[in-house]
């Protein structure tokens, strides 16, 4: 009797794995790769200005004062248009936002800011995604909370939606 | 019908294009290193690093701008004298095990390595018991 039951074990195992595979197929795949640099200091960097209107960005710009936002964006990035009003809202709350423009041209950056507003105090130009890779960011847009010591405290992946503003404000408060 | 299919195909093609930038690629994205030995080292490493944008391809296989920028990092770091292991560790420190196609034993990946060993031990145990039993059965009947 016992060996009879044992005969069913392979079929049961097969059914389990087939079921698991079927279930996983229906699950939405998480496309985001989170940075493992949270809690680490920003790497040293100094980027040239992304266009004539604002200074460039360096690690030193994050050290001292209040926690700041580091916004990874690009003029060619469509979700960046969607998050522009939210960045404005954060700026209106007194948050300093330093931008890094990925693989961008000065004239495109200037055009984008003219059309969608300029929430930044500085924008560095990262033509080869050097700083982006160094902080573990895998796409545009992404927003990092950097505390006054220059330590990365929080990462927001994707465009900032209306409900994310409060989350970012709370993370900035936590980073004080 | 065919026209509708073509329109659909065109629509599929248009979306990724809209998301691309038009900047020239980084210097070492598509250019090989002059030293063939260093280039071979870089190429071997690039085949074992995952593209972050197009996650089922290695950065050697992908045409995504970000993969190009990652290849530039690999080649320029190799040129600067870093070892492939150092570069892999640098990327893993930023993106986790996920970025590497060469799994390392860590707190999250150890079951991958442990399960086959456990299964082999289990099978070996079962086989030994069975064979041993059969032999002793044969001994009794003979």
Image (spheres, rainbow, N blue to C red):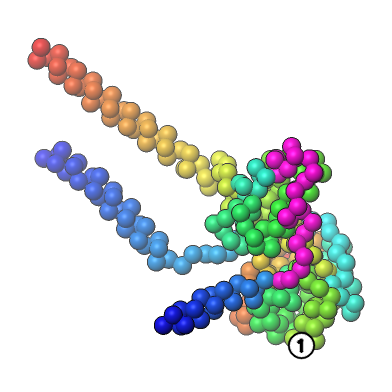
Q: Position of residue B127 (x, y in %)?
A: 28, 27
Q: Quadrant of the C terminus of chain A?
A: bottom right
Decide which of B56, A121 is in the foreground and name it: B56
Q: Residue at x 58, y 64 (%)?
A: A32
Q: Position of residue B20 (x, y in %)?
A: 67, 71
Question: For the image shown, how many numbered marks are present on the structure?
Answer: 1
Q: Residue at x 31, y 28 (%)?
A: B125
Q: Is residue A110 above or below residue A157?
A: below
Name, please, the residue furthest toward the bottom: A115
Whether residue A48 sits left or right of residue B25 in the image: it is right
Q: Residue at x 79, y 40 (%)?
A: B35
> What is the magenta segment's predominant secondary structure?
loop
Q: Quadrant of residue A18?
A: bottom left
> Disc 1 on helix, strand or loop?
helix
Q: Quadrant of residue B1?
A: bottom left
Q: Is residue B81 above or below residue B92?
A: above
| Residue A76 appearing in the image | yes
Decide which of A63, B56 is in the foreground and name it: B56
User: What's drawn in magenta, residue-wise?
Assistant: B21-42
Q: Quadrant of the N terminus of chain A?
A: top left
Q: Quadrant of residue A168?
A: bottom right
Q: Which residue is mark 1?
A: A115
Q: Is residue A112 above or below residue B134?
A: below
Q: Residue at x 51, y 81 (%)?
A: B7
Whether residue A138 sits left or right of residue A122 in the image: it is left
Q: Position of residue A36 (x, y in %)?
A: 65, 56
Q: Position of residue A59 (x, y in %)?
A: 84, 62
């Amino acid at each position: 009797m016992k060996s009879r039951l044992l005969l069913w074990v392979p079929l049961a195992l097969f059914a389990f794995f087939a079921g698991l595979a079927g279930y996983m197929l229906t699950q939405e795949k998480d496309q985001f790769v989170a940075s493992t640099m949270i809690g680490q200091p920003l790497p040293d960097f100094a980027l040239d200005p992304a266009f004539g209107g604002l200074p460039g960005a360096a690690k030193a710009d994050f050290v001292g004062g209040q926690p700041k936002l580091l916004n990874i964006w690009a003029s060619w990035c469509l979700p960046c248009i969607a998050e522009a009003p939210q960045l404005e809202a954060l700026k209106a709350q007194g948050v300093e936002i330093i931008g890094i423009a990925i693989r961008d041209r000065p004239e495109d950056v200037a055009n984008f800011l003219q059309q969608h507003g300029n929430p930044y105090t500085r924008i560095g130009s990262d033509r080869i995604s050097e700083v982006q890779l160094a902080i573990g960011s895998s796409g545009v847009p992404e927003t990092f909370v950097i505390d006054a010591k220059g330590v990365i405290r929080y990462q927001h992946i994707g465009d900032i939606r209306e409900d994310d503003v409060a989350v970012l404000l709370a993370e900035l408060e936590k980073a004080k | 019908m065919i026209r509708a299919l073509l329109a659909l195909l065109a629509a599929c093609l248009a979306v990724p294009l809209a998301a691309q930038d038009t900047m020239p690629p980084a210097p070492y994205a598509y250019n090989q290193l002059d030293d063939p030995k260093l280039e071979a080292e870089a190429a071997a490493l690039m085949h074992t690093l995952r593209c972050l944008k197009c996650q089922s391809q290695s950065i050697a296989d992908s045409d995504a701008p970000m993969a190009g920028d990652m290849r530039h990092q690999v080649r320029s770091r190799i040129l600067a004298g870093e070892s492939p292991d150092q570069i892999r560790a640098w990327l893993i420190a930023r993106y986790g095990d996920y970025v590497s196609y060469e799994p390392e034993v860590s707190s999250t990946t150890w079951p991958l390595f442990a399960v086959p060993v456990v299964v082999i031990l289990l099978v070996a145990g079962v086989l030994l018991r069975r064979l041993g039993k059969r032999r002793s059965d044969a001994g009794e009947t003979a």
